[in-house]
Amino acid sequence: MSRRLKTLIAAILIVFFWLPFYALLIMGLAWHVLPGAPWYVALLFYALAGTLWIVPIGLSLPWMYREPAKR
């Protein structure tokens, strides 16, 4: 598979599936966790939520940029 095709597949999966799923998950979690929480819990929650969305994207980068196998 060419690098361009892998990049297209990863971009489509990330933008149309991963990010909306993650955003809805975090919103639902915040709805249940944060209403009565102190400010420092909310700060920690949003700091983690704002950082953890990148983990699956970072894991897909080596796959995207791996050279195609020579036949």
Image (cartoon, helix red, strand yellow):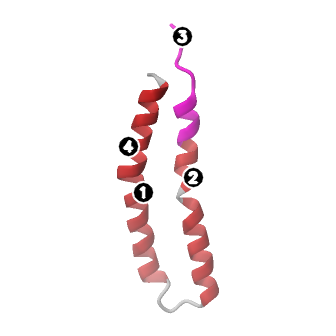
Secondary element at image label 3: loop
The mark nearer the N terminus, 3 or 2, is 2
Residue 20 versus residue 26 in the image, above or below: above
- In the image, 3 versus 56, the foreground residue is 3
Q: Which residue is mark 1?
A: 19
The boundaries of the magenta stretch are 60-71
How far apart, in angstroms, are the residues tagged by discs 1 and 4?
Answer: 10 Å
Residue 40 within the segment the image draws in magenta: no
Residue drawn at point x = 56 percent, y = 74 percent: 46
Q: Which residue is mark 2?
A: 55
Secondary element at image label 2: helix
What's the amino acid at mark 3? Lys
Residue drawn at point x = 59 percent, y = 62 percent: 51
Proximity of marks 2 and 1: CB atoms separated by less than 8 Å:
no
**Between tags 2 and 1, which lies in front?**
1
Residue 17 versus residue 34 in the image, above or below: above
Residue drawn at point x = 40 percent, y = 36 percent: 9
Question: Could you say where residue 54 lies in the image, as x and y percent from the top left?
Answer: 55, 54
The mark nearer the N terminus, 4 or 3, is 4
Residue 5 versus residue 46 in the image, above or below: above
The image quarter in which residue 50 lies: bottom right
Q: Badge 4, how many Cα within 10 Å: few under 14, some, many 20+?
A: few
The mark nearer the N terminus, 2 or 1, is 1
How far apart, in angstroms, are the residues tagged by discs 4 and 3?
Answer: 26 Å
The label shown at residue 70 is 3
Q: Which residue is mark 4?
A: 12
Q: Badge 1, how many Cα within 10 Å: few under 14, some, many 20+?
A: some
What's the amino acid at mark 2? Val
